[in-house]
Amino acid sequence: MSDNDTKKPSGDAQPPPKGAPTDTPAAKTGPEPSNPPAGAKLDTPPAAHSSATPPAPPPPAPKPAGPPPPKNPGFVTCTIDGKEVIAKPGTNMIEAARSVGSIIPYFCYHPRLSIAANCRMCFVEASNAPKMVPACQTPLAEGQVIKTTTPKVKEQQRAVMEFLLLNHPVDCSICDQAGECKLQDYYMRYDYRPSRLEGGKVLKNKRKVLGPRVVLDQERCILCSRCVRFMNEVPKEPQLGIFGRGSHEVIDTFPGSELNSNYSLNTVDICPVGALLSRDYRFRARSWFQSAAPSVCTGCSRGCNIYADFMGQETYRFRPRENDAVNKSWMCDQGRVTYKALNLGRVLSAVVGRKQGDTARPEVARQEAIQAAARALTDAKGKQLAVLASPVASNEELLAALTFAKGTLGVGEVYVGGRPQGEADHYLLTADKNPNRKGLELIAQGLGLTLKPFDELVKGINGGKVKALYAVGTEVPGDVEGFAQTAAKLDVFVAQATNESALTAQATVLLPASAHIEADGSFVQVDGLIQRFRKAYPSKGDAVAHWALAAELSRQMGGSATWTSSREIFRELGKGVPEFASFDWDKAAPPDREKPGINPLATAADGRPPGYREFGAPRVRGL
């Protein structure tokens, strides 16, 4: 290769000539040159440029634009089906849509349980998501646009319904859930097509007894997992699980155990289909033949809010009614079965004279019995007469009866009856089995009466200090049979009772009293909350409320009682109780019917007529 082909060094500097000193550390003995080579970096600027202004730094790169400030600070503003929604942060789409009248269907979602998002029925389109999202699991975002009625959403709902019904048994005609089943309602609204399944369906256990109160039809189960989550999260008794895989997946109890929780029947309430059923209610009545009245459970002092489902003058079941301050959406199994006392062993007519042996006592007209009771109490006034009051009676009944006892009978002490103490649990059930003990205490204090324990009444009768007794309710905290023998020593025993017992057999005058389900009134529960309940149906037989019996006795004995309703009693006599002064009896009444009287409409699991449960804002969330 020739010299001409040799590559020249890059840059402007040329190589030094031959013989010139090289730039090595040994050669650097003289002073530095005043003009450094071109391209060299100076640590110190030359003197000639020392006063020059340094160049300005380049401007920073612009930051990406952030999200716009919220339209309503502290809230999330979005659009659902063309309507603006302002909701709290964290609100899910189902609840937000419901607030503007858009109903998103769902099976597995429950507002008081964790989110599972496994039924896929609540898929909607959202502007900030490339695919459809489950409305139960997805919180709202600022400026989000949500659509719940597009063809894509409707096809998703139809496909989910077809999938759920693929192996579902067609036994609606014998299913207890018929008339209050979400699967039926959603089929009519979102699917309404015949099955395309060819061949037989997957068969499972039709009558799997899970425990003493619940039976499971595994073929009807859609595996929403509501029951499993409830048992894990609310009573914290994980007695249910999901077992198996694929088409053979089932709900069941763990091996060697059973569903025996005191809250097991809540799983029946929240089951959206007819899979979990109450063994007590099963095959007894159809939901569309029943009506429901908002009431209060009298099983203990908690005062759980309930619906009483009834047909004619017979109660068929109690269901929880939502109240965040008391029982949320739940109630215990022990409270549910207390409805049976409303149907069986009732005192339906008045009787005069004690029962002798097995011979039935002749029944008399109530007015005749009132006259006999008035004569007996008049003779006993001031002569070893005592009053027994039951905390099972309502505030209105106790106000009237104790006012009569103080003003007409002239007593200053009242003995406390009521049911005996029982067991409590870790959640709702209390040891006090009386619904209105607080109310009795407040009323006695307001009327200036002294409450005395039941044991002192027993001692007084046995010691001969008490010869006559007027009882408002015959529930006693001790042994009923034992006290019945003690009551046999009384010369006069006027008893107002709802149910027959060994004690009512010893009454010299027995007056039939209405149960709480047969009258309007109120209770004071264990935490001091006053709660109204409504009348479901007219009183059975010749029974009337305790306040009406007290008013009849008062008038018969020369008093001036003019009470004609529970409302009038509370407004008139409740003024003497400071705790009742601020309670609005009318406004506190739970919504029930559009006009006074017996509710003519049959109702379903959430307190509304069948067919109206998914077509408007539910009165009760999550049921």
Image (tube, rainbow, N blue to C red):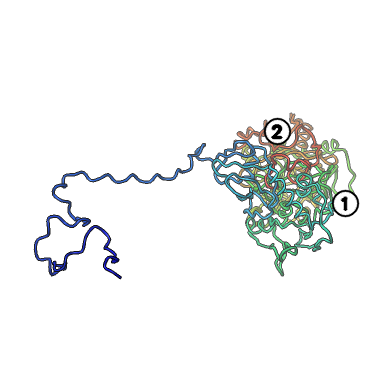
- When asked about the image quadrant of residue 242, the answer is bottom right
> Label 2, on which residue?
569
Identify which amino acid the numbered label 1 is placed on. Gln
Question: Where residue 56 appears, x then y in whole percent?
Answer: 27, 44
Question: Where residue 343 appears, x then y in whole percent?
Answer: 82, 48
Q: Nearer the viewer, residue 599 or 249?
A: 249
**Residue 29 drawn above or below residue 272:** below
Element marked by disc 2: helix
Question: Where residue 114 appears, x then y in whole percent?
Answer: 62, 54
Question: Where residue 604 appears, x then y in whole percent?
Answer: 77, 44
> Label 1, on which residue?
356
Q: Nearer the viewer, residue 437 or 150?
A: 150
- When asked about the image quadrant of residue 482, the answer is bottom right
Element marked by disc 1: loop
From the viewer's perspective, is 349 left or right of 303? right
Specify few, some or many for label 1: CA neighbours under 10 Å numbering under 14, 14-19, or 20 or more: few
**Residue 495 drawn above or below residue 17:** above
* Residue 513 visible in the shown view: no
Mark 2 near mark 1, Cβ–Cβ under 8 Å? no
From the viewer's perspective, is 307 left or right of 95? right
Picture disc at residue 94: none
**Residue 229 drawn above or below residue 593:** below
Q: Give the quadrant of the N terminus.
A: bottom left
Identify which amino acid the numbered label 2 is placed on. Ile
Specify few, some or many for label 2: CA neighbours under 10 Å numbering under 14, 14-19, or 20 or more: many
Q: Nearer the viewer, residue 329 or 205?
A: 205
Q: Residue at x 72, y 58 (%)?
A: 223
Of pointers 2 and 1, the one earlier in the residue sequence: 1
Which residue, as the protein is rendered here, is positioned at the far left?
30
Distance between mark 2 and mark 1 Cα atoms: 38 Å
Which numbered disc, 2 or 1, marks the residue closer to the eye? 2
